[in-house]
Amino acid sequence: MKIAVAGKGGVGKTFISSTLCRLLASDGYNVLAVDADPNYNLAYALGIPSEVADGIVPLTENDALIMEKTGVSSDAYASVFNIAPTVNDIVDRFGVNAPGGVKLLVMGTVRGGGTGCMCGANALLRVLVQHLLIQRGEALIMDMVAGLEHLGRGTARRMDAMLVVVEPRMKSMDTMRRILRLAEEIQIREVLAVGNKVANDAERRFVKENMEAMEVPVMAMVPYDAAVGMADMKGVPTLEYAKDSPAVQAIGELKDYLVGRYRP
């Protein structure tokens, strides 16, 4: 099962990604969480201690690794370098063990002009994403920015689905429209919506009506939940702070749906 989670900054996609990962792992799945967001917050959301999380170097900033794999430095724009580096050792070497049996890989973000940018860091990421989607067997949850920079045509078709997290605000709807255009260009198989921070029936209708207008199925409505904020203030995952909270329960139902739909 290969799922990308995207959305406007601040809508809660990292909370949803991390909770999905932990719930899948608790069901016995081998789970690889991939942080492809330049803010690199997935480690904390998974419950990795700050003294460990603070020491994680994103792959795109690991100059020694980029040089080893491509023959050029991480930000070098060169005419000659290895465009097909070997990447099958990267998860074992740089994956970080998170609580609950999840493994985390912090990729970092692409440089400059998107996935076509000819630099060593982007060449490594392009091949790595292909490897993760095609050759590895874990349940993969990738926490992404709204621009979908890591996914190119061909690679995106290997994703089972993209979950776009939206909140009941018009800016979030505008982000969904932009993601839909990009998703069509790179041929993502299926785009699904997850409403988050939904506080009342009016907000539920707002999300539902906008998604119906865009012809995007809504797979879950995660309610506004004070436990999410309290857990964040305490620096622990909501799943550990209040495992039976309404938001966690809603993501649990989403997890069950995804497993039933995409499990081999």
Image: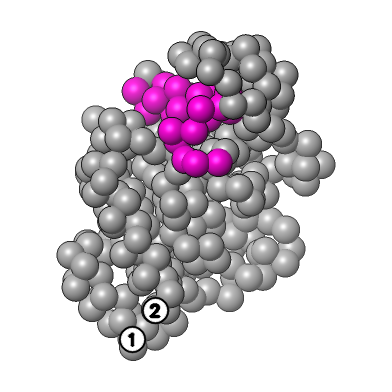
Residue 85: x %, y % from top left? 51, 13
Q: Is residue 90 above or below residue 53?
A: above
Magenta-highlighted residues: 112-134
Residue 258 in sight in this render: no
Judge left or right: residue 36 versus residue 217.
Answer: right
Looking at the rendered structure, the secondary structure element under dot 1 is: helix
For this orientation, the residue located farthest to the bottom is 202
Q: Where, quadrant-wise, is the C terminus in this rendering?
A: top left
- Identity of the residue drawn at 42% across and 47% down: 148
Query: Mark 2 sits on what residue?
Result: 170
Amino acid bearing label 2: Met
For this orientation, the residue located farthest to the front is 79
Amino acid bearing label 1: Asp
Label 2 neighbour load within 10 Å: few <14, some 14-19, many 20+: few
Whether residue 132 appears in magenta in the rendering, the answer is yes
Disc with the residue nearer the chain's start (2 vs 1): 2
Residue 104: x %, y % from top left? 58, 35
Looking at the rendered structure, the secondary structure element under dot 2 is: helix
Q: Closer to the camera, 144 or 23? A: 144
- Identity of the residue drawn at 35% across and 61% down: 178
Whether residue 219 appears in magenta in the rendering, the answer is no
The residues bearing labels 2 and 1 have C-alpha atoms spaced at a distance of 16 Å
Q: How is the image coloured?
A: one colour
Residue 83: x %, y % from top left? 48, 16
Residue 198: x %, y % from top left? 42, 77
